[in-house]
């Protein structure tokens, strides 16, 4: 089993790779910017930090990477995990600094978190997960467990059943989405200590 973590110039790849290595049990963890490596991987991870448009442009600039993602994730059905902006890219559009095209894998748009007088944006720090739709990546995790966030925008899916978990931050904010062989987390598993490692371990065991 090999997990390919896509390197397109966005995200704390070293931190993510270390977390996946810690959670692995005989799994090879490969950080790569070569599209061909996705063909040899069993699992695919797309991290992301920064603005939606910048991440989309960075990914598009990697030769053949978008075609390889579609082939391996959509056509072949390999397990896929998007993290933070990597999750947001699964949407139809990102509305950060203009309108930017996403993958269209999860119907919906990425919109700014609405401000409240008592709340700061970005939404940063630990918050409690509330489960919306059962999913294998949440096995062994108790509702109300804390995970770590850093974001100013959220994905608002069109189909409620594709929301797997939310957090309360002046209202419900999408924390996790998924359908078929694809899952995305707005929170950072690599920064969420034992719970994050459990999510990663569940991802390795998942057979959609």
Image (cartoon, grey):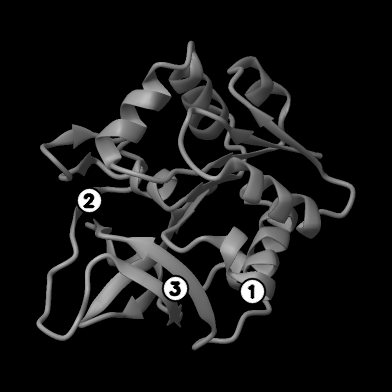
Question: What's the residue at 61%, 44% (across, down)?
Answer: 79
Residue 135: percent from left, percent from top: 55, 68
As displayed, is residue 66 above or below residue 150? above
| Image quadrant assignment for residue 163 | bottom left
Mark 1 closeness class: few <14, some 14–19, many ≥20 residues within 10 Å: many
Horizontally, is 116 left or right of 175 in the view?
A: left
Do the residues under discs 2 and 3 have CB atoms within 8 angstroms? Answer: no
Residue farthest to the top?
Answer: 63
The answer, for residue 180, to whether it is visible in the render is no
| Image quadrant assignment for residue 42 | top right
Residue 188: percent from left, percent from top: 51, 60
Mark 2–mark 1 distance (CA, rounded to whole Å): 27 Å
Ranked by sequence position, the earlier of labels 1 and 3 is: 3
Q: SS at mark 1?
A: helix
| Residue carrying label 2 | 108
| Mark number, residue 133 | 3
Residue 140: percent from left, percent from top: 68, 79
| Mark number, residue 195 | 1
**Nearer the observer, 156 or 194:** 194
């Amino acid at each position: 089993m090999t997990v390919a973590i896509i390197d397109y110039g966005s995200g704390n790849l070293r931190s993510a790779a270390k977390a996946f290595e810690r959670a692995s049990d005989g799994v090879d963890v490969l950080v790569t910017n070569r599209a061909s490596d996705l063909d040899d991987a069993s699992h695919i991870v797309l991290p992301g930090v920064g603005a939606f448009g910048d991440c989309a442009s960075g990914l598009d600039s990697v030769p053949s990477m978008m075609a390889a993602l579609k082939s391996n994730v959509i056509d072949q059905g390999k397990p896929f995990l998007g993290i933070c902006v990597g999750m947001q890219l699964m949407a139809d559009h990102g509305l950060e600094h203009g309108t930017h095209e996403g993958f269209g894998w999860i119907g919906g748009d990425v919109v700014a978190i609405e401000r409240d007088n008592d709340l700061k944006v970005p939404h940063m720090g630990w918050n409690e997960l509330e489960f919306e739709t059962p999913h294998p990546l949440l096995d062994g995790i108790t509702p109300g467990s804390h995970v770590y966030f850093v974001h100013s925008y959220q994905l608002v899916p069109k189909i409620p059943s594709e929301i797997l978990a939310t957090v309360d931050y002046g209202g419900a904010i999408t924390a996790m989405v998924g359908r078929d062989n694809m899952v995305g987390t707005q929170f950072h598993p690599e920064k969420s200590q034992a719970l994050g490692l459990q999510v990663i371990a569940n991802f390795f065991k998942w057979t959609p």
